[in-house]
Image (cartoon, coloured by chain):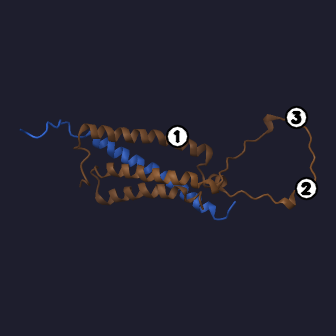
Chain colours: A blue, B brown
């Protein structure tokens, strides 16, 4: 086993958890925006 | 506080597409987690063992003659071999994985720009979205 590989393995694991954390925050924000969004229907420009 | 636009005020179809994208992305992450758990490991020690360089065979250590014999095979006594990845072949994975990470991070950024987050938090999450993908292969390709 290469000596320096252990430290880099932490980086690989950190990247996975970081990716999961980003996903959770963006999902929460997206769901919040989607469920509390405007209920109005765009009727287009008034004629 | 809005970034590029307001997802909250966007058309219902835009919000539907945003939610569906995130849900299907999460669906793929479930399989990614299972694959990493089974084939790469969830601890630094297992990741190191998976991507550790293999020791080359020393020809001088091999016997000059060999013998063969037949023995009964006991399947119950066999231990499961740890999965190992040849790091010299990782370029086949990394070039496509990192590109997909960048595309997913860009799509997530499009959603982040529509959320009512503060500018600092927005920039932190955008940086994390791109940084996580860039870090992923740092442990296995070095």
* Image location (x, y in percent) of residue A27: 37, 44
Q: Circle 3 is placed at which residue position?
A: B72
Question: Is the residue marked by circle 3 packed among few (<14), some (14-19), or many (20+) residues within 10 Å?
Answer: few
Q: Residue furthest left?
A: A47
Question: Is the residue marked by circle 2 packed among few (<14), some (14-19), or many (20+) residues within 10 Å?
Answer: few
* Image location (x, y in percent) of residue B91: 57, 55
- Residue at 57% in and 46% down: B36
Q: Circle 2 is placed at which residue position?
A: B63
In the foreground, B118 or B17: B17
Quadrant location of the N terminus of chain B?
Answer: bottom left
Indicate whether B111 appears above or below A7: above
Dot 2: chain letter: B
Disc 2 element: loop
Question: In the rendered view, does A31 fall on the left or right side of B79?
Answer: left
Question: In the rendered view, does B114 fall on the left or right side of B65?
Answer: left
Cβ atoms at labels 3 and 1 below 8 Å apart? no
Q: Circle 1 is placed at which residue position?
A: B31
In the foreground, B61 or B41: B61
* Image location (x, y in percent) of residue B10: 23, 43
Indicate whether A29 appears above or below B63: above
Q: Earlier in the sequence, mark 1 or mark 2?
A: 1
- Residue at 40% in and 39% down: B23
């Amino acid at each position: 086993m290469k000596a320096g590989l252990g430290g880099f393995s932490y980086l690989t694991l950190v990247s996975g958890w970081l990716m999961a954390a980003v996903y959770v925050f963006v999902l929460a924000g997206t769901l919040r925006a989607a469920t509390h969004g405007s209920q109005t229907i765009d009727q287009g420009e008034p004629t | 506080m809005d970034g590029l636009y307001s997802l909250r005020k966007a058309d219902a179809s835009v919000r539907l597409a945003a939610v569906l994208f995130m849900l299907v992305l999460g669906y793929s992450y479930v399989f990614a987690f299972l694959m990493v758990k089974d084939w790469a490991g969830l601890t630094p020690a297992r990741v190191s063992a998976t991507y550790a360089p293999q020791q080359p065979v020393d020809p001088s250590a091999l016997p000059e003659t060999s013998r063969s014999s037949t023995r009964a095979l006991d399947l119950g006594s066999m231990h499961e071999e740890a999965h190992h990845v040849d790091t010299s072949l990782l370029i086949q994975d990394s070039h496509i994985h990192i590109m997909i990470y960048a595309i997913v991070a860009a799509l997530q950024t499009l959603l982040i720009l529509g959320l009512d987050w503060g500018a600092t938090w927005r920039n932190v999450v955008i940086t994390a979205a791109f940084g996580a993908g860039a870090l992923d292969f740092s442990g296995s390709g070095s």
